[in-house]
Amino acid sequence: MLKFNNGKPYHGSSAATGGKLQGATDTDYFYFFCPNCLDKRIMRILDYEVRVEQNENPYNKEFKKKAKKGFTLAFQLYCENCKHTDYVKISNMGWQGGTHAEALAVVGA
């Protein structure tokens, strides 16, 4: 069985942290833009993994609207133009509100 990132450890690079990795939607699909290409090239998603999946979301006790479960998804991104490879995670068990600037301040602390 193949493992995500061939079983090697991974973490997003400095190009993908601190608000530098950006993206947008066209219809309801989300695209990540290459942090190295000035013309916002769309990165391919080469692989993904469900890193965490649990029946209870730890933030449900703090909010009125309840999430059905907790999860973290990891994606391997690749830019065909400049050959940059990176990793990003999407989760509903991390930062749960506030502003982008506040999240960056917490991460940078």
Image (tube, rainbow, N blue to C red):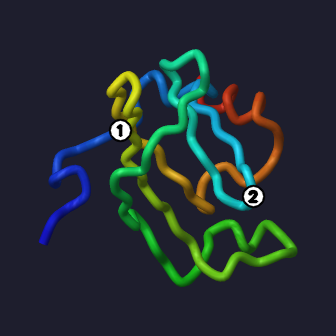
Instruction: Identify residue for label 1.
Output: 11
Asked whether residue 69 is in view, the answer is yes
Name of the residue lying farthest toward the right: 64
Name of the residue lying farthest toward the left: 1
Q: Pinpoint residue 73: horizontal percent, then vertical percent.
A: 47, 60
Q: Which image quadrant for residue 101?
A: top right
Q: Residue at x 41, y 33 (%)?
A: 79
Q: Residue at x 49, y 78 (%)?
A: 54
The answer for how far apart the CA atoms under marks 2 and 1 are is 29 Å
State the count of labels: 2
Quarter the C terminus occupies = top right
Q: Residue at x 76, y 78 (%)?
A: 66
Asked whether residue 109 is in view, the answer is no
Quarter the N terminus occupies = bottom left
Where disc 2 sits, the SS reads: loop
Mark sitting on residue 30: none
Mark sitting on residue 27: 2
Tell me which amino acid carries mark 1.
His
Side (left or right) of 103 relative to 62: left
Q: Pinpoint residue 94: horizontal percent, then vertical percent.
A: 60, 53
Tell me which amino acid carries mark 2.
Thr
Q: Residue at x 37, y 47 (%)?
A: 76
Task: Depth check: give the residue in front, 24 or 104.
Answer: 24
Side (left or right) of 103 relative to 108: right
Compared to 44, does 73 lie above or below? below
Q: Counting residues from the N terminus, which is met first, the one under dot 2 or under dot 1?
A: 1
Where disc 1 sits, the SS reads: loop
Side (left or right) of 88 relative to 6: right
Side (left or right) of 43 relative to 91: left
Q: Nearer the viewer, mark 2 or mark 1?
A: 2
Q: Pinpoint residue 39: horizontal percent, then vertical percent.
A: 60, 20
